[in-house]
Amino acid sequence: MEPERRDFRAMMFYDFMRKISVEQSHDNLVGAFQDQAPSKCTMERWYLDFRRERTSLQDEARSGQPSTAVTPETIAAAETLIKEDSRINYEQFAETLKIGKATINTILHDYLGVRGLLARWIPHNLSEMQLEARVEWCKFMLKKFKGGESKRVYEILTCDETWIYQYDPETKRQSSIWVFPGEDPPVKVRRARSVGKKMVAAFSVRLAQ
């Protein structure tokens, strides 16, 4: 049996009365219920209600967008929009579905169970051939210096390097996407979009005496 919204609120109220923080309560629920647990933002709102002595386990009636806006049709439409463009934002949802942001939030988190996640940076996305080429180059350089053919490396005092791009790469916030329960979190290759780039390296060496 899957827990309902009021079940989570009851567990949170128990944690609240025991002086357990929102962060710890959220970690406990996620550890027990994974993707079924409410979002941290929702839990912070409920904690605020508890501090205001609003301890009812049922949602209070709200003015504004009627509850009938949450229908199987709007839920299915929202799911389709996410599958077509996982980076869609609340404004685009509201404009397309003609419903309020509060209703959109309810559909996304309570019915679809999606989460907005930021892409995790990974340093490179190299092919097997590129990885092998790097290993071979390192072996070649080690062999070269070991053989005494060049000792210039010992004269290097310090060095620095940087990439110069033709345009700014996509920010981490811009790479945020909606993820359905059970899906892997997104990853993003660092600087992958900046195809026009040059590396500049500067070395400080010891002058010969």
Image (cartoon, helix red, strand yellow):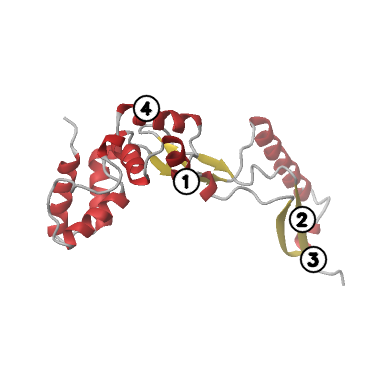
Q: Are marks 2 and 1 in contact (CB under 8 Å)?
A: no
Q: Secondary structure at mark 3?
A: strand
123 or 29, nearer to the observer: 29
Q: Which mark is residue 200?
A: 2
Disc nearest the viewer among 4 and 1: 4
Under mark 2, the amino acid is Val
Per the model, the C-alpha gap separating discs 2 and 3 is: 16 Å
First-in-chain label (2 vs 4): 4
First-in-chain label (2 vs 1): 1
Could you tell me residue 37's position as x and y percent? Answer: 26, 42
Q: Which mark is residue 158?
A: none
Per the model, the C-alpha gap separating discs 2 and 1 is: 30 Å
Residue 138: name its quadrant: top right
Q: Which mark is residue 205?
A: 3
81 or 135, nearer to the observer: 81
- For the N terminus, the quadrant is top left
Whether residue 24 sits left or right of residue 200 in the image: it is left
Could you tell me residue 143's position as x and y percent? Answer: 75, 44
Per the model, the C-alpha gap separating discs 2 and 4 is: 50 Å
Disc nearest the viewer among 2 and 4: 4
From this view, report whether residue 37 is shown above or below residue 180: below
Could you tell me residue 9's position as x and y percent? Answer: 17, 47
Could you tell me residue 77's position as x and y percent? Answer: 40, 29
Q: Are marks 2 and 4 in contact (CB under 8 Å)?
A: no
Q: To which residue does mark 1 refer?
A: 118
Q: To which residue does mark 4 refer?
A: 76
